[in-house]
Image: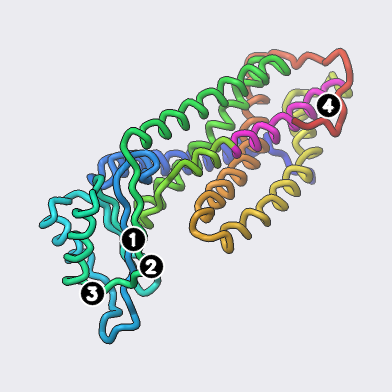
Amino acid sequence: MKFSVIKYRSLWWSISAAIILAGIVSMAISWTRPDIRAPLRPSLDFIGGTRLQFELDCTKPENCKPIDIAAVRQILDTQGLAGSSIQVIGQEQQGLSLRTKTLDVEQRTNLQTALSEKIGAFAPQSTQIDTVGPTLGKQLFTSGLLALLLSFAGITAYLTFRFQLDYAFFAFVAVFHDVLVTLGVFSFLGLVQGVEVDSLFVVALLTLIGFSVNDTVVIYDRVREVIKLNPGQSIDQIVDDAVMQTLGRSINTTFTTLLTLFSIFLFGGETLKYFALALIVGFIAGSYSSIFVASTLLAWWRSRTGHSIPVPAEGINQSEEV
């Protein structure tokens, strides 16, 4: 029996709604957290400040022990740094990552000295200190948000020109679905694992937007081709046929891309780890939304309005992609 995406569209929509709702709840909780105050935990790239990362020196006797986060918070309070972000890192909880307001050299030295006296000696080669000014952080945030908005506007205009407005609208819904899913996952990771989003995260969002639109356009092209070949079929049957004809291509493309991304995630180092994870989440969500959301919404809308799909004047090349 041939699989029908239309038959189970309520299930696909329910899965998407549940994941997005969970993400929105996570973002709301994140916003109320005093150490985050944003839908996602922002890195220094966006808010500015100083990040200090230390690791206990295990070459010294009795120095290598799990770090007590309560003791660290007490030290920060005495240094006038209450409300700073504290994260104990490493499998043995012997590393420490702090994000504070912008500190000068003297303040950083005093803080490091106080921590060493109470927590233990730190390995000099593992100490990392980064400072980003609030003005630069604000510029990066504004530029990233503007890039996302322009990409959404460009996609809507392009799809309206190439297809019709309802095509463009449901493709936009699918892209927005992918972005919300990715934001929700990283909001949750920010709450439970302290994962921060930086400028590379914005790059990942822009990349997955392009990927999702490409997948959706391939299905839409096939819908137009099927209606040209079988103009008497119902829209539900047309969409089912179009999805089944492109399903193998979508799965294979996503699978081969994910192989590379998982390699980057596992072996690419800390800098690219969460960039790759954002792409992994977004690409999976993009393939899902193109197959199960954009296509089924288009069929539902055309059935509801009784609006027929226009047959293009010229045939569509089956290998055509965007």
- Judge the density around disc 1: few (<14), some (14-19), many (≥20) Cα neighbours within 10 Å: some
Residue where numbered disc 4 is placed: 226
Indicate which disc, 2 or 4, sits on the residue closer to the N terminus: 2
Q: Is residue 55 left or right of residue 105?
A: right
Indicate which disc, 3 or 2, sits on the residue closer to the N terminus: 3
Q: Quadrant of residue 21?
A: top left
Question: How far apart are the alpha carbons under marks 4 and 1?
Answer: 58 Å
- Contact between labelled residues 2 and 1, with CB atoms less than 8 Å apart: yes
- Residue 155 vertical position relative to residue 25 in the rendered view, above or below: above
- Contact between labelled residues 1 and 3, with CB atoms less than 8 Å apart: no
- Mark 4 or 1: in front is 1
The reply to whether the magenta stretch includes residue 226 is yes
The reply to whether the magenta stretch includes residue 307 is no
Helix, strand or loop for the magenta stretch, by majority: helix
For the rendered model, the colour scheme is rainbow
- Identity of the residue furthest to the front in this view: 105
- Residue 259 vertical position relative to residue 248 in the rendered view, above or below: below
- Contact between labelled residues 2 and 3, with CB atoms less than 8 Å apart: no
Q: Quadrant of the C terminus?
A: top right
SS state under label 2? helix
Say which mark, if any, is on residue 120. Answer: 3
The image position of residue 125, as x and y in percent, is 39, 69
- Under mark 4, the amino acid is Val
SS state under label 3? loop
Indicate which disc, 4 or 3, sits on the residue closer to the N terminus: 3
Say which mark, if any, is on residue 53. Answer: 1
- Residue 262 vertical position relative to residue 294 in the rendered view, above or below: below
